[in-house]
Image: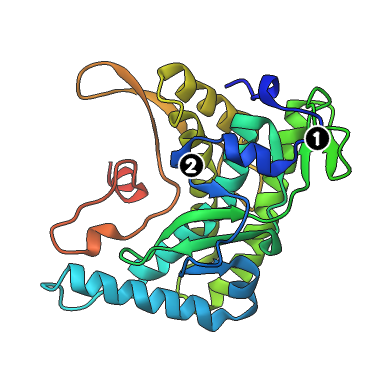
Amino acid sequence: MSPHYALASPAEGLRASLSRLPEDARLRGDVPEDEPGWAHCADLLGDPARLVRWRERLGGWLAERYPEAAGIPERIPASWILSWYLHVPALAGAMLLHHERRVPSLAPSALAFRIGGDRPHPDSVAVLDDRFHCLPTDPGSARAGAVVVPDERTLATVLRGRFVAHANRFIDVYGPLTRLGRRQLWAAATDALDNALWSAGRLGGTPEAEGAGVADAALVLESRFPPLTSASKLRLAEGADGRREWTRNREGCCYNHLLPAESECVGCPRIRDRD
């Protein structure tokens, strides 16, 4: 999808970009003082006990949702919190790259998110730093907070590097709090980034927009960049109606199948391993 350069002015910063994103992206440039449930990423990583409490809250929510379960296996909430947290920097980077061709800071100090009051997942994300990387054609490239890169491939490299840096800090903190292996942790990070880039295109609501998101995923994850576990896994496959549609194989497992009456997700590696 083409960025909204026609709407931008040289004076506009990242908040203007955030205001132009689709409403369903649920990205904003501040943390509302009157809204409960907001958490700063830096605070969570600085106090791992808060991550444990979030995981325990999710475990309680799952126990209420599945009262017939004898117990909720620890790896389910551990895996869900892993994916939910990594979704935050992935979403912020993917949406701004796709819709504005800008890459924000993805440092923990630059991001916050709101944990839903019912289902305890991130339902809104705030990007708190107005600085960004952009292309030479960006009208805001002369701003003090803008860093100009020569082309889209370089911009994709910046996004990937910033996401991996945040993911690495999170995994170093969260990994010792779980029994999940290192490969599982980075598989979740890979899924988060690939899915976020795909979702950025799908929000456009047309096959062309979705295809543009797939192209961005191929640009950012054109091959495997360790510690990420794979290149983009997006591919065309025949759907139930016989038409070809985009899908992807997951790198990691969320363990949803361990819940009563639930099964593996589409593209789950457990299914592929049995085939």
Q: Whole-percent x and y of residue 175?
A: 54, 72
Q: Earlier in the sequence, mark 1 or mark 2?
A: 1
Q: Nearer the viewer, residue 122 or 30?
A: 30
At x 65% / y 31%, what residue is drawn? 100
Which residue is denoted by mark 1 in the rendering? 11
Q: Which mark's residue is nearer the viewer, 1 or 2? A: 1
- Looking at the rendered image, the quarter that the C terminus falls into is top left
Q: Is residue 229 visible?
A: no
Residue furthest front as drawn: 34
- Residue 47 appears in view: yes
Q: Quadrant of residue 240?
A: top left
Label 2: few (<14), some (14–19) or many (≥20) C-alpha neighbours in 10 Å: some
Which color scheme did the rendering employ for the protein? rainbow
Which type of secondary structure does the marked residue at label 1 adopt?
loop
Residue 157 coordinates in the image, percent (x, y): 73, 38
Query: Disc 1 versus disc 2: distance between alpha carbons?
Result: 24 Å
Tag 1–tag 2 contact (CB < 8 Å) = no
- Look at label 1 and name its amino acid: Ala
> Observer-nearest residue: 55 or 254?
55
